[in-house]
Every structure is written in structure tokens, then in C-alpha cells.
Amino acid sequence: QKEVEQNSGPLSVPEGAIASLNCTYSDRGSQSFFWYRQYSGKSPELIMFIYSNGDKEDGRFTAQLNKASQYVSLLIRDSQPSDSATYLCAVRVGGEYGNKLVFGAGTILRVKS
Amino acid sequence: ETGVTQSPTHLIKTRGQQVTLRCSSQSGHNTVSWYQQALGQGPQFIFQYYREEENGRGNFPPRFSGLQFPNYSSELNVNALELDDSALYLCASSWAGPYNEQFFGPGTRLTVL
């Protein structure tokens, strides 16, 4: 089992729809979870982080965390063509002060106008 | 606030050569992590530097080595380059602490021929 798993996609949604991206992780001790957006040929950009169970909202983005199910998701409301990118889920491993981020392979999102 | 910078942007080397990549951390950050990203994959953790010492290492051979300087900038050195070392090398800076939000530089694209 991979440490962090994501559906590779591509996930295609129409402009204005909600895009739902999912991620599961294997380390039960993980405390911190991150979503990065990566445009083709560019480096990853941190868009959301979440540490507590439940939802965290920031503009059009909502991160959801369920530690019991070891599941993290990212919702993008009112999707725009500019949201088309690869979305990387990352989990900090190694306990409370763990120093390593483990990434999934990423989900490709395509927003069609 | 100055973001993370990396140099060079692109590099072409031949098998067996050595390479040094450089990274300047974001102002206010004291920790630098290095990642390797192969095409179509998520970033893989190489190692992290904190207070000029290696603070965790991923599954990479000893020919991958690094340094951190008193101003928190860092170098990644790779000896005896192999074809499989061709990848995007990413530097991420953060403030050491329980949450460890990491911010990436633009990356160095290394091609080994």
C-alpha cells in the first residue's frame, strides 16, 4: 500500500461546477495535511493545509479531513478553467514534529468552459 | 517578503558528472527540504536541513548530499550522475515547528545524458 494515494484522473468538470479531489493515507500518526496545485512545467504551490478533523474553508476551496477514515479531500467550488492543473495531496509523517512530506502522485483536473 | 529561489533553472549534464544545485529560503524560514520529482510523479523527499545539519533523509543513496549555510540557504550535490537522476529538483523552505508548512521554489530541471 502506498503511503499517500490519489486517483490520477483526469477529472473533468464543467466550468462553474464543484470539483472533488480525494486522498487516502496510511500513517495513522500523521497530524498535518496539505494540498498543492501544480501547473504544467511549474513547481507546486501550497493552496490549503488542515490539521483538525472537519472542514476548513478558504475562498472557493474547502479541505476536509477525517482521521478515523484516513481520508483528506479538497473541494473547489465554481471551478474555473484556470483551476486546470495537477493537485497534489501531501501528508507530514514522522509524528508531531515529523519533517518529511509524503506526496501522492497527483490528480489531474480539467475544467472545461 | 522574499520567496524561495533556486539556481540554475535548467541544467544538462552527462552520466558520471557531478552537479550542485542552490536554494535560498524564504525570509523568516530556517528549514530547507529537497525533493526530486520525476515526470508524472509526486515529489519524493531527499533530505531536510535545519540549523546546518541534516534533519531526516529519504530513500536516496549517499551520492546525494547537501549543505545548509548560516543564512539558511542550501545546496544539493549529486555525484556520479545517472540517467535516472533526470528530474525536477525542488527546494522547499519552512519554519521548524509542529505544522511545517513548506513553500516551494521554482525548481531546477536536470537532464542527464
Image (cartoon, rainbow, N blue to C red):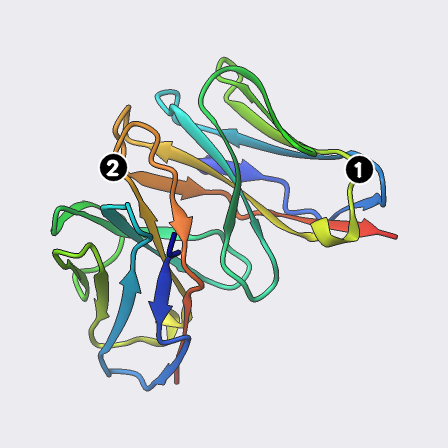
Give coordinates of residue B84: x percent, y percent: 38, 70
Left or right placement of residue A70 versus residue B4 in this view: right
B38 to the left or right of A11? left
Judging from the image, mark 2 belongs to the subunit labelled B
Q: Residue at x 27, y 32 (%)?
A: A98
Q: Which residue is mark 2?
A: B96
Image: A79 above or below A30 = below
Q: Position of residue A83 (x, y in %)?
A: 71, 49
Q: Quadrant of residue A6?
A: top right
Quarter where residue B5 is shown: bottom left
Give the residue type that dot 2 points to: Ala
The quadrant of the rendering that contains the C terminus of chain B is: bottom left
| Chain at numbered mark 1 | A
Q: Callout 2: 10 Å neighbours few (<14), some, many (20+)?
A: some
Q: Position of residue B9 (x, y in %)?
A: 41, 75
The residue that appears at 43% across and 53% down in the rendered structure is: B43
Determine which quarter of the picture holds residue A41: bottom right
Left or right of A96? Residue A64 is right
Q: Residues within 10 Å of mark 1 (few under 14, many from 20)?
A: some
Numbered disc 1: secondary structure = loop
Frontmost residue, B95 versus A40:
B95
Q: Which residue is mark 1?
A: A78
Q: Please check whether the numbered discs 1 and 2 fall on a single chain.
A: no
Residue drawn at the location 35% of the way across and 67% of the way down: B6
- Above/below status of B59 relative to B107: above
Position of residue B16 relative to residue B61, above or below, is below
**Contact check, label 1 and label 2, Cβ < 8 Å:** no
User: What kind of residue is marked 1?
Assistant: Asp
Q: Is residue A99 above or below residue B78?
A: above
